[in-house]
Image (spheres, grey):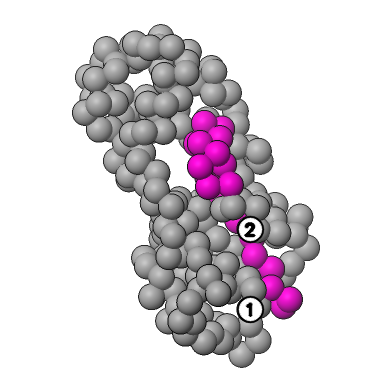
Amino acid sequence: MPHPQVMIFDLGGVFIHHNPDPFQPHFVAQHNAPEETLRNFYLQGHKEHEKGFVSSEKFYQRAVAEVGYAHDYARFRDDYCRTFDFRLNGEMYEFVQWLRRKHGGEIEFWLLSNINEIHLEFISCHWPGVFSSFLRVFLSCNMGCRKPDAEIYERALKEGERSRYRCAFIDDLEVNGEYPRRIGMFFHKFENVEKFKTWLPQIGVAIDQPRNLTS
């Protein structure tokens, strides 16, 4: 089996652990609105924010006006990141660094992520290597579209000038893999590093079991 020419990775849930339910008590307490109202506001508004259609400052202003966020913009940025409890998945990060060293001459490594400006700045500050490790980085806030919409995948493929049939996509959400799979891309629903390692030989990416990924 010919191996993929490109491996395209999601960010959140793959390299960055995050809280899938950001409505923690400390975050809710910063607003003057019922939790259900907060959920409606953030779950809808974050999509426009992730597409870059709403700037971070405008998103903050709307949070103040519509759901009673009680502090300044700097505090909002901090609260909005802290509630997601971002943490690096060090095991996956180191394994993909090893994959790049082993296969970088024959496989390109790309990143494709739904992300807003606030979270992008936070992750870039804390773990800058997550972005610099990839040949191409496609971010929803810069592209004006987001997964699972077909446009973001098609634009990445067009810009990268690669055949969909020679691309593999790795994401922690099944819904984000539906379109890639439908158009002929390999897809792996990421759960953990061990399952990812088991999947790689199935698409023609032979791996040794490294004793020390950082050596």
Give the residue at mark 2: 133
Q: Is residue 184 magenta?
A: no
In-image side of 95 versus 81 (left or right): right
What's the residue at 65%, 77% (across, down)?
103
Q: Is residue 115 magenta?
A: yes
159 vs 47, left or right, is: right
> Disc 2 and disc 1: Cα gap in Å?
14 Å
Report if the CB atoms under discs 2 and 1 are less than 8 Å apart. Answer: no
In magenta, the rendered stretch is: 104-128
Q: Residue at x 55, y 74 (%)?
A: 215
User: Is 208 placed above or below 4 here?
Assistant: below
Quarter of the view holding residue 78: top left
| Relative image position of residue 142 (x, y in whole percent) | 65, 38
Query: In the structure shown, which secondary structural element does the residue marked by tag 1 occupy?
Result: helix
Amino acid at the residue labelled 1: Lys
Q: Which circle's residue, 2 or 1, is located before the other in the chain?
A: 1
Q: Secondary structure at mark 2?
A: loop
Q: What's the residue at 41%, 33% (across, down)?
A: 81
Residue 20 vertical placement versus 107 (above, below): above
Q: x%, y% of residue 161? A: 78, 63
- Residue 97: name its quadrant: bottom right
Label 1 neighbour load within 10 Å: few <14, some 14-19, many 20+: few
- Residue 102 disc label: 1
Question: Can residue 211 be seen by looking at this rendering?
Answer: yes
